Structures are given as structure tokens and as C-alpha cells.
Amino acid sequence: MKLKMPCIKCFDQDRIQEPVFSYLEISDSNIHEATCARGHTYLVALTQHKHEVLFEIGAMALADGYPREAIATIAAALERFYELCIHIICASRRIPEGQLDATWRLVDAASERQFGAFLFSMLLWSNECPEVIDNKKPTLPNIAKSNTRTWKEFRNAVIHKGLLPPEHVAIEYCELVYAHINQLTEKLTSEHKAEWLAQAQRQATEAQQKNSEKELIVYAVPTTLFLARGTNAAGSFREALKQLGDYREIYTR
């Protein structure tokens, strides 16, 4: 997926009024080098968290008619959101980043261990057992809940066994994850907004330190989960999916 963004230098330096666009291929680092059609080159740091970018890709997959790809990508977004929660809770406890990174490397290759770390981090933070949406079950026509797989079993069948899910089940899963992430985001940011913002800026800060001789532009993308934190937030994933159509032109294949 590529991001279409106007060249800032064309406006600031050359006073060119008409938009001149750069096309950034969104990568894992969230730091990108852009060159516009007039030759301006600069670094762009996206302020979106990793889970927000993944969720956006999953939402677009669903909008394009690929429910299987949507479920796999939204599931990855949820895992990265859980990782972010751990980082924010540890930051609120003033745990040194080096110690957190060293500990994370011990569970980095095992998603179940990561999920366990998330559960106990939330427990220590809130004194409550966190909700586990994996234990819930999808609504399938003419099939009793007792005979239905849990979301965890269903998701694993999609990712590992090639199960082809119907669109309405994919939408239900995305709706569940959308509400779950937004609920936890609201709880965390109500108490730890500074830590939340610091995690979003972390990659940009590291990139600036490594490329001090280059100009770095910080850029915010109106992703589905990013907009969900605003005043005009969509109340459901279905509404957010419709909202995606209003700004999707900023993305190119």
C-alpha cells in the first residue's frame, strides 16, 4: 500500500500553489524517504501506531472484497495493539526501555506468551481481569452457539488452514476488534495520554537522531482507528468502513 501526500517543500520553499504529490510505500519502519516530481527529497515519519496501519490495511481488504485477508490483517493489528498496551503500562511504571526491550525479546517469537504478558499487564494496571474477546463466538445462521467455534478457533482456521470466511462473518470479527481496541484505547489514554503520544513519536525521534543531517517531516494519516479517537468518531466498524470511502483517495496500490 502506498500513501499519497503533498510535497511540503513545494509549498514552503518554492511557493508552488498546485499540489505536487509524493508516493510513499508504507513499510514496517514507519519512516520513509520521499521524492516529489520536482526532485525535493525528505524523510517522512508517520505518527500512526503499527496497529492503526495494519487495521487500515485490513479494512481496505474488506472493502475490496477480501474477507480472509481482512481477518488475518485485523488479527495482526490486535496483537500489535496488545504489545502497545504493554509498552504504555510499563512506561507509566517508569520501567527503563532497555529492560522492557530485553524482556520483550524473550517472548517476541511466541504470540501466546505475548498475549499472556498483556493479560497480566492489564491486571496489574487495573486490578481487573481483562476481557478476552477470543473466547466469544461468531453468529452463524442455522448453527447453534454450542456448535460454533470460538473466534480464536475461527481466526486460526482462517490463517493456518485456509478457511474462506463469508463476508458477514469477517465484518462481525472486525466489528468486535474495532470496539475492543477503541474501548481499551479510551481507558489507557484517559490516564496515560502522555505515554500514548510518546510511543507514537518514538520512531520519529529515533529516525531524527540517526538522520540528523536530513529534514524530517512528521505526518498524520486519517486512519480508521485514528479517527475513532476524534469528536466525529464512527460508532461502529460498519460506519467506519463507509467513512473510509471519503478519504481513501490518499492511498494508492
Image (cartoon, helix red, strand yellow):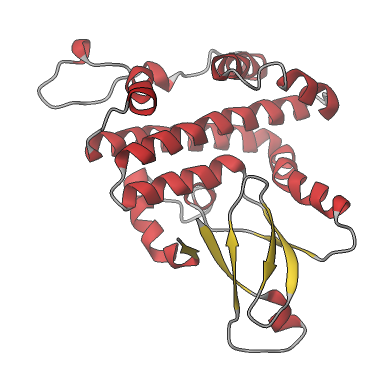
| Residue 215 drawn at (x, y percent) | 82, 66
Residue at 53%, 60% in the rendered image: 2
Residue at 70%, 35% in the rendered image: 192
| Residue 157 drawn at (x, y percent) | 33, 22
In the rendered image of this protein, does residue 201 appear above or below residue 192? Answer: below
Q: Nearer the viewer, residue 91 or 204?
A: 204
Q: Does residue 144 appear to the left or right of 245 in the view shown? A: left
Residue 96 seen anywhere in this rendered image of the structure: no
Residue at 70%, 29% in the rendered image: 87
Residue at 38%, 15% in the rendered image: 135
| Residue 222 drawn at (x, y percent) | 53, 58
Q: Nearer the viewer, residue 76 or 179?
A: 76
Number of callouts: 0
Q: Nearer the viewer, residue 164 or 81?
A: 164
Q: Does residue 92 appear to the left or right of 237 in the view shown? A: right
| Residue 43 drawn at (x, y percent) | 74, 62
